Amino acid sequence: MPASLVQTLQQPFVANAVVAGTAIAAIAGLVGFFLVTRGQVFTGDALGHVAFAGAAGALAFGLDLRVGLFAATVGAGVLIGALGRRGRADDVVIGNVLAWVLGLGVFFLAVYTTSGGAGNGTAGITVLFGSIFGLTTQQSTTVVVVAIVVAVLLLLIARPLLFSSLDPEVAGALGVPARWLGILFLALAGVTAGEATQAVGALLLLGLLSAPAATAQRLTTRPFAALPLSAVIAVADTWAGLALSLAVPVLPPSFSIIAVASGAFALAIAASQVRRRVLGARAA
């Protein structure tokens, strides 16, 4: 191993990136599993745009970027869930919220860039593409704490949420509060989107939410096996992406993470097709 790479691995920013990346990937995998299962992947894309609008709003009003980031994503998640049926937002609701927040984002960005206090010209780029190697020790610790809270809450509602996701009519007939579960889930998805934006950015957020979950569901049809597997795959993708970015410095970490996640999904598709052909040949 080159001496320069060894020295890089010993830097605090690498440890912060690994710790924060692990926590973010784990909850992204858990939340992503339910987004894919509930057919709400488009919601993850909308939350990425909301994250940018919220961050731009915070910058325009001179606030901490993360305040606007989390306020916007959580608020949008609750709004999307409240407007949809049984806490499930349809494409019309998401499309309207998406168009609205994009307009707000453009407005806030214009205010920020034309104001005299717009000294940090890289802030918008950081939100769009992430800055996982720029996280401080305090920030990575906060990420871990928030991730633990999200994971615990999500696991507490996992069984009734899965029931209402797979069979909402029967779940409703049996008294499962599907609407409130859906709203709570989308609020947790909003927190996760805010967390993941710090790692991979608003533009690439959807990849971290959807690719590991889709990969897990290609590898197993059992929901409660796919749920933890999705988190494991997301963490592995993040570690591999960080390692690739450190080994090849020209590759941004957000790109590397999503590239690995997409590659793993492609391999899972190929593996499932081969398995299907083998089983078909045996059956014949």
Image: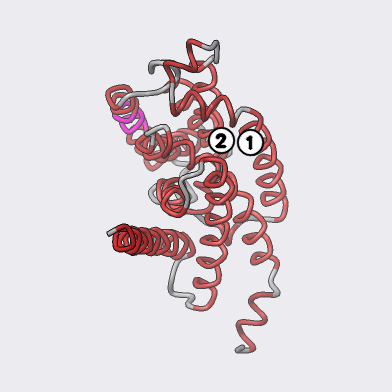
Q: Is residue 100 highlighted in magenta?
A: yes
Q: Residue 32, how many percent across, how many down?
A: 48, 42
* In this view, 99 is above or below 9: above
Residue 44 in picture, x, y percent from top left:
41, 38
State the residue in front, 173 or 199. Answer: 173
Asked whether the viewer can see residue 125, the reply is no
The amino acid pointed to by label 1 is Val
Q: Secondary structure at mark 1?
A: helix
Distance, label 2 to label 1, CA atoms, is: 8 Å
Q: Badge 2: how crowded within 10 Å, few (<14), some, or many (20+)?
A: many
Sequence-earlier tag: 2 or 1: 1
Depth check: give the residue in front, 14 or 192.
192
Q: Amino acid at mark 2?
A: Val
- Quadrant showing the C terminus: bottom left
Instruction: Name the residue tied to disc 1.
Output: 150
Question: Which residue shows up at 41% across the image and 23% down it?
Answer: 88
Picture residue at 46% right of the left edge, 27% below the top: 165
What residue would you read off at disc 2?
191
The stretch of residues the image draws in magenta is: 98-104
